[in-house]
Image (cartoon, coloured by chain):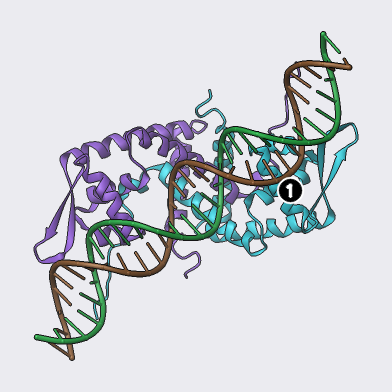
Chain colours: A purple, B cyan, C brown, D green
Amino acid sequence: MPMDALDRTTPPTLTGLTPYLLSRTGKAARGALAARLAEQGLRLWHMAVLAALADFGPHAQRELAVRLSIDPSDVVKVVDELAGPGYVERARDPGDRRRVVVTLTPAGRTALAGLSDQAAAVRDAVLAPLDPAERATLHALLSRVFAGLDGLSTP
Amino acid sequence: MPMDALDRTTPPTLTGLTPYLLSRTGKAARGALAARLAEQGLRLWHMAVLAALADFGPHAQRELAVRLSIDPSDVVKVVDELAGPGYVERARDPGDRRRVVVTLTPAGRTALAGLSDQAAAVRDAVLAPLDPAERATLHALLSRVFAGLDGLSTP
DNA sequence: ACCTATCATTGGTGCTCACCTATCATGCGA
DNA sequence: TCGCATGATAGGTGAGCACCAATGATAGGT
């Protein structure tokens, strides 16, 4: 019975590259979070829409599309799925009847709180090797990197 | 002519979550790197295989599969595409003729160096907001997070 | 010598994403 | 009032990815 102890070490040439580490840790974080949301029948975009509504109030669907950099036709589908469980409500804008204004319901707000808890749990799992101060440092650095992402190919 | 100045601010509820930042920055880094590699007809797995061969010497294809956590059948395809331009060579293992040993060629080593340069350029672009000391800190923190990723769902 | 496990290989499948087009209703300026 | 732009919606497409099944060759134990 050969113990099959093959070397699983990741090549240092890769781990020495910050983009590689970002990619891998990002993928792990995304996957873990998506798995949790999937348990409640939701995906990442659903959480993003709920968060946008919670933070900035009601949006026309086009506004959601712009804010989240998502295709307008995909906003329709996401809002459809959020309206199903009653997390959001659609209403025609009386001032411009082409627009559909999406509003967060109390149930939606509760759901978002639950999702945030899930995200916190994922954070604790992924950042387990770091102490609180280090986690704060990492978050601050990532925030600045994230803020600079806009002007990557479009300066 | 309406200036169409819609709010593009990302919801703070999201940016306050480290997993979200990790996911976004990771995706950006991955995308930028993939775009560069694509210019040379390669994808991320090609670079990973070249790096594994450079760091640990010749591998049987099964060893590559285990090390990189990739399906054996996908290793075949990646090695096919690397053998095309002559970046790697295949040879039957004389000691076990089922095995195919993959070896890095000088051309492959040169190619890997070029890819590493591309990765460095991506790093500089993505981490532009950070000074050298901060980049080092980020890299060190990510390294530790990455090292802890194995035991996420399998403790 | 036989039976089973391992390895490489081929070919295919399902999923998720991001994106694109066409259609219809509405608003607004010429 | 006509013509064009905008918003929402329905539906489709293609790339990338991870994964799976079947096949043929070879090893190795009993």
Give residue A89's position: percent from left, percent from top: 16, 48
Q: How many marks?
A: 1
Q: What residue is at 34 percent from the left and 47 percent from the top?
A: B14
Considering the numbered disc 1 on the image, is that residue within a helix, a strand or a loop?
A: helix
Is residue B92 visible in the rendered image? The answer is yes
Q: What residue is at 28 percent from the left and 57 percent from the top?
A: A64
Q: Does A104 sit above or below residue C23? A: above
Q: Which residue is mark 1?
A: B79
In the picture, measured across the screen, residue B89 lies left or right of residue A7, that is: right
Give residue B106's position: percent from left, percent from top: 84, 55
Q: Quadrant of residue C9?
A: top right
Q: Does A117 sit above or below residue B16? A: above
Give residue A66's position: percent from left, percent from top: 31, 62
Q: Residue furthest right?
A: B94
Name the one closer to the observer, D14 or A134. Answer: D14
Q: What residue is at 55 percent from the left and 42 percent from the top?
A: B142
Q: Does B99 sit above or below residue D10? A: above
Within 10 Å of the Cα at label 1, are there few (<14), some (14-19), or many (20+) other Cα atoms? many
Q: Identify residue type, mark 1.
A: Val
Is residue A127 visible in the rendered image? The answer is no
Give residue B88's position: percent from left, percent from top: 80, 51
Image quadrant holding the N terminus of chain A, namely top right
In the picture, measured across the screen, residue A113 lies left or right of residue B109, that is: left
The chain that hosts pointer 1 is B
Q: Does A96 sit above or below residue C28? A: above
Q: What residue is at 54 percent from the left and 37 percent from the top?
A: B145
